[in-house]
Amino acid sequence: MTKQRQPLNREELLERRKALKARLERERRLALIADLSASLEDLKISFTVHLDREAVGWIFDHYPVVFSGIDWAKVPGSTTRPYIEEDEKDRLIAGIISEHLAPGDAVTVIFGNADTPSLSLEAQAVIRHTDLFTDECEDLWVVCPEKEFCLECYHEGYVGYKAGE
């Protein structure tokens, strides 16, 4: 005689459904950066994926954010620099990060699409492979809270940043 399984009660079914939905959402979000993750792994670059919005919260806590990004005109001591070409944008971002951060400083890269997970890694990875990050999304932020550093690349042709207090 085979042992018959007891049917799950409603609460157990709801809990299983909730867990399944969470797993599927996590997989969907990770798929958004699958190519970038694979490229970083191929380059032997260590990184951590963040599905939370903690780094975005840091930006909102420290900078005036409007619909389109940071309102740099309201940030004392900040700088905005225009770019025209993609290569120019990549050089500009790499140069600003190099000027204000040490290669081993921990940074978080946040992408303009709020669903896209952010990545924590060393500044040198962003400096050396800026194009990998800008190819992922035209709008991105690179933050280093420990150094009070925030850089925003905006798709309408400028990079805004502030380093230190």
Image (cartoon, grey):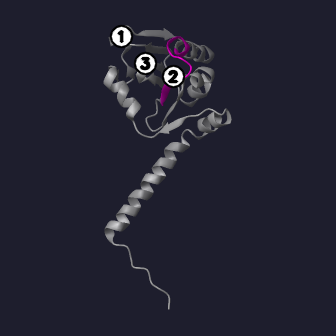
Per the rendering, the mark at residue 105 is 2
Give, as a three-letter code, the residue at label 1.
Ala
Residue 160, image x, y percentages: 45, 14
Q: Nearer the viewer, residue 98 or 56?
A: 98
Q: Nearer the viewer, residue 37 or 165?
A: 165
Give, as a three-letter code, the residue at label 3.
Lys
Q: Earlier in the sequence, mark 2 or mark 1?
A: 1
Q: Dot 2 surroundings within 10 Å: few (below 14), some, or many (20 or more)? A: few
Give, as a three-letter code, the residue at label 2.
Asp
Secondary structure state at the residue bearing disc 2: loop
Given contact means CB atoms under 8 Å apart, are the residues at marks 3 and 2 in contact? yes
Q: Nearer the viewer, residue 158 or 3?
A: 3
Question: Which is more foreground, mark 1 or mark 3?
Answer: 3
The magenta-colored residue range is 97-110
Q: Give the residue drawn at x 52%, y 43%.
A: 30
Per the rendering, the mark at residue 147 is 3
Question: Which is more foreground, mark 2 or mark 1?
Answer: 2
Residue 25, image x, y percentages: 46, 49
Residue under label 1, please give it.
Answer: 73
Q: Give the residue drawn at x 43%, y 55%.
A: 21
Can see residue 139?
Answer: no
Residue 14, image x, y percentages: 35, 63
Per the rendering, the mark at residue 11 is none
Q: Give the residue drawn at x 60%, y 18%.
A: 86
Q: Earlier in the sequence, mark 1 or mark 3?
A: 1
Q: Is residue 144 left or right of residue 60?
A: right
Height in image: 26 above or below 15?
above
Given contact means CB atoms under 8 Å apart, are the residues at marks 1 and 3 in contact? no
Q: Is residue 106 magenta?
A: yes
Mark 2 to mark 1 CA distance (whole Å): 27 Å
Q: What is the tally of numbered marks visible in this picture?
A: 3
Height in image: 137 above or below 3?
above
